[in-house]
Image: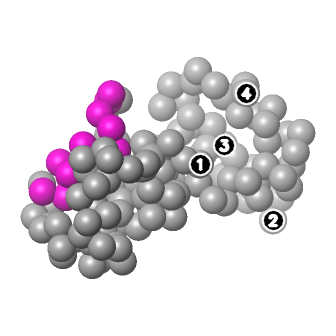
Amino acid sequence: MTQPPWYPAKTMAPTAKSFGKVLRERRLACGFGLREFAQLVGVSSTYISQLEQENIDPPTAERAAKMAEILRENADEWIALAGRVPDDLEGIIQKEPIGMPALLREAKGLTAAQLQKLAEQAKVMKGENS
């Protein structure tokens, strides 16, 4: 069974680590210096340092996604780690204000494998509606 493109090839293990701690670990593991990484993200090295030291709030969803992209991580996981929600979800929910929240509530508690199967079924159903 192949995974949909949005499904991460690897996932971060459930962790109590903060965004800053995970960011520092991954940045160093990927071999990025503070200044180099900050430049790639488009922020100051002071901002990254403050973020890693947990002196400031986690980044916006957009910035967390950019960091994840640079570090080759799953953007949705990093957005969640930052305590944010992906920007596109608001529009998706507003387009189907009854059905989408109901689906999310019913899906709550499913395992990762069950969610993957549900996503695959939704993809098939979307193809049938085309």
Q: Which mark is residue 105?
A: 4
Image x and y of residue 15, in percent: 32, 30
Q: Does residue 16 show up?
A: yes
When the figure is inspected, residue 61 is found, relative to residue 69, above or below; the finding is above
Q: Residue type at mark 1: give it.
A: Val
In which quarter of the view is residue 69 placed? bottom left
Location of mark 2 (residue): 130
Seen from this angle, which residue lies furthest right? 98
Q: CA distance from mark 4 to mark 1?
A: 16 Å
Q: Does residue 72 show up?
A: no
Q: CA distance from mark 4 to mark 2?
A: 26 Å
Mark 3 vs 4: CB contact within 8 A: no
- Is 2 left or right of 87, judged from the image as shown? left
Span colored in magenta: 15-28
- Is 71 left or right of 119, judged from the image as shown? left
Between tags 4 and 1, which lies in front?
A: 1
